[in-house]
Image (tube, helix red, strand yellow):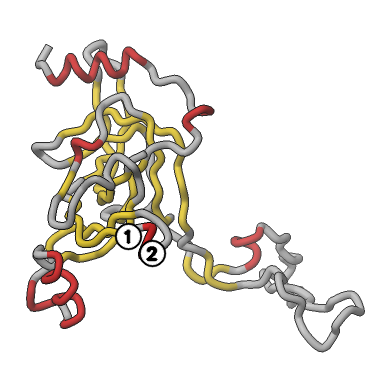
Amino acid sequence: MKSIIGRKIGMTEVFAADGTMYPVTVVEVLPNVVVAKKTTEKDGYEALVVGYEDKAERKANKAEKGIFAKAGVTPKQGLYELKGDEIFSKNVGESFGAELFTAGEVIDVIGHNKGHGYSGTIKKYHHHIGPKGHGSGYHRQIGSLANNGRDNNRVIPGKKMSGHWGPEQVTVQNVTVIESNQEKGYILVKGGLPGPKRAIVMLRSPIRAQFRKPVVKALVDLTAAEQKGE
């Protein structure tokens, strides 16, 4: 198992040697710098705490400066926990990047969707709209909050009402890595990924690999041919 932090840049398309077009999401993968290690003896589990993307020294507060100074690294924009046997051997101060995944691998991608802000029940839960006649005083309201004679002094928890909708954590399973470029620091993933542009995403080994779809071998071969300039 392995995982890495990246930033979703946007979507584009790549063409194989035979002219086949593949929609891909570009994930920027800057060096993931190990800031600390969680161990079973001290924390009850094993994980790496990595920092992603450099941060100006003047923008880091005193607590953050202490954390990064202890690790001997420059301040980072964010700290994230990553799990995986293949990356736990990394020591504090070391880094890893796009070379962790190769073309043809199947991975899971975790991110947060865009969300819908404050939404009504018709949009959020697909409730029925009221009569549209001008004489009607009810169009898109929430409707009755009565509890059918039970606990009429309160609204029962779980009642579907208007409110904030998202963003929520979403996991896209079993997507294929089309290309991994360590020099330029990006990974191309087939299809769409959750979140808006420049959203932080986590790429990890699939947890349901035994149920994953078979990887199209021709796709990997064509990508290798493109890299060689054929």
Q: Work out which residue is located at the far right of the displayed protein and give it.
A: 149
Q: Residues within 10 Å of mark 1 (few under 14, many from 20)?
A: some
In which quarter of the view is residue 15 placed?
Answer: top left
Q: Residue at x 39, y 44 (%)?
A: 109
Could you tell which of marks 1 and 2 lies nearer the N-terminus? 1
Indicate the position of residue 165 as horizontal and vertical percent values: 53, 65
2 versus 65 height, above or below? above
Would residue 111 appear left or right of 223 to someone viewing this image?
right
Instruction: Specify whether residue 200 is in view.
Output: yes
Q: Residue at x 20, y 56 (%)?
A: 34
Q: Residue at x 35, y 49 (%)?
A: 83
Q: Residue at x 10, y 63 (%)?
A: 73
Indicate the position of residue 60 as horizontal and vertical percent values: 15, 76
Mark 1 → mark 2, Cα distance in angstroms: 6 Å
Q: Work out which residue is located at the far front of the displayed protein and give it.
A: 41
Q: Residues within 10 Å of mark 2 (few under 14, many from 20)?
A: few
Indicate the position of residue 186 as horizontal and vertical percent values: 19, 40
> Which residue lies under the disc numbered 1?
38
Number of numbered discs visible in the structure rendering: 2
Q: Amino acid at mark 2?
A: Asp
Say which mark, if any, is on residue 225.
none
Q: Secondary structure at mark 2?
A: helix
The foreground one among 132 and 86 is 86
Indicate the position of residue 36 as horizontal and vertical percent values: 23, 61
Quadrant including the C terminus: top left
Check whether the beta carbons of the residues at disc 1 and disc 2 lie within 8 A of each other. yes
Q: Secondary structure at mark 1?
A: strand
25 versus 199 height, above or below? above
Quadrant including the N terminus: top left
> Which residue lies under the disc numbered 2?
43
129 versus 163 height, above or below? above
Q: Amino acid at mark 1?
A: Lys
